Every structure is written in C-alpha cells, then in structure tokens.
Image (cartoon, helix red, strand yellow):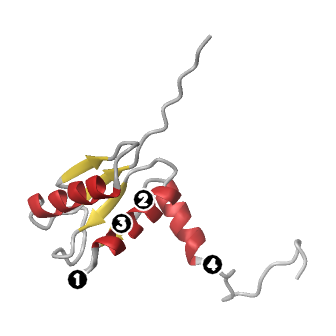
Amino acid sequence: MSEGESKPPGQHPEVEIRDVMRQRFSTGQGVIQLQPGMTDEMILFMIKQAISVSNGKSFTVIPPSQQRCSTEQGLQGFIQLYFGMTDEETLFVLKQAVSLGNGKAFTVTPPSKIVVAVE
C-alpha cells in the first residue's frame, strides 16, 4: 500500500507495546501496578524501566493491595527521586510509600536533569 492509499475500514496499524508505553510515560501518563509477591529486583527493574522511558516526567505507582486506580480517589502522595540514590535507597523509599500510603496510589518523580550554564 502506497503512502497516498487509505487502509480498508476495520484495519488498524500494528501498535508496538513499547511505543505505547514510551509515549504514555514520556507524557506523564505512565502507570505501574505492583503485584503481590514481587521481589525487590522485580520492583527495582520496573521503576528503572519507567524512569528510562519517562523523559523526566512523573508516573503513578499502584501498590499491590489496591485493585484499581480511579481518578476520584486522587493520589495520596508522591516521591521525588534524586541522582545518586542507590538501589537500596530507592527500594526503601518505595516500600515506605507503599507501607504508609494505606493502599493508595502515589506519584514517583524521576531525578531532574539539572543544567548549569557558566558564562
């Protein structure tokens, strides 16, 4: 099919899940659902993946005890991550947010890129 031709009704372009995920996270609409029984390594992997595609935008983390995230509930809190945090520090902060949040979703803000200009 050439560029000028239209697709027959009912056909949709194939969508790559990575592209959708990257687009949602990079526009500040990313959501991560933690599952019961996830290991520390799995949680850390998910957070790092989200940070890598977020373009510095915040994303929502839903703890394992919350079945769904509705907009009426609002977000209970937020976490600001910083450059130089170790994996252990990041996990500690995430686990504290889950523990103190009573099952409410919270926002994670990746480390900001600080640009310093010297004239």
Of mark 1 and mark 2, the one earlier in the sequence is 2
On residue 78, the disc is: none
Quadrant of residue 102 within the rendered picture: bottom left
Residue at 51%, 68% in the rendered image: 21
Q: Residue under circle 2? A: 29
Q: Secondary structure at mark 4?
A: loop
Residue at 12%, 59% in the rendered image: 101
Q: Secondary structure at mark 2?
A: loop
Q: Residue under circle 1? A: 37
Q: Residues within 10 Å of mark 3 (few under 14, many from 20)?
A: some
On residue 15, the disc is: 4
Locate residue 6 relative to residue 41 in the image: left or right. Answer: right
Of mark 3 and mark 1, the one earlier in the sequence is 1
On residue 44, the disc is: 3
Of mark 4 and mark 3, the one earlier in the sequence is 4
Q: Position of residue 113 (x, y in %)?
A: 49, 37
Quadrant of residue 19 within the rendered picture: bottom right
Of mark 2 and mark 4, the one earlier in the sequence is 4
Of mark 4 and mark 1, the one earlier in the sequence is 4
Residue at 51%, 58% in the rendered image: 52
Q: What is the three-letter code of the residue carrying label 2?
A: Gln
Dot 4 and dot 3 residues touching (CB under 8 Å)? no
Q: Residues within 10 Å of mark 4 (few under 14, many from 20)?
A: few
| Nearer mark to the viewer, of 3 and 2 | 3
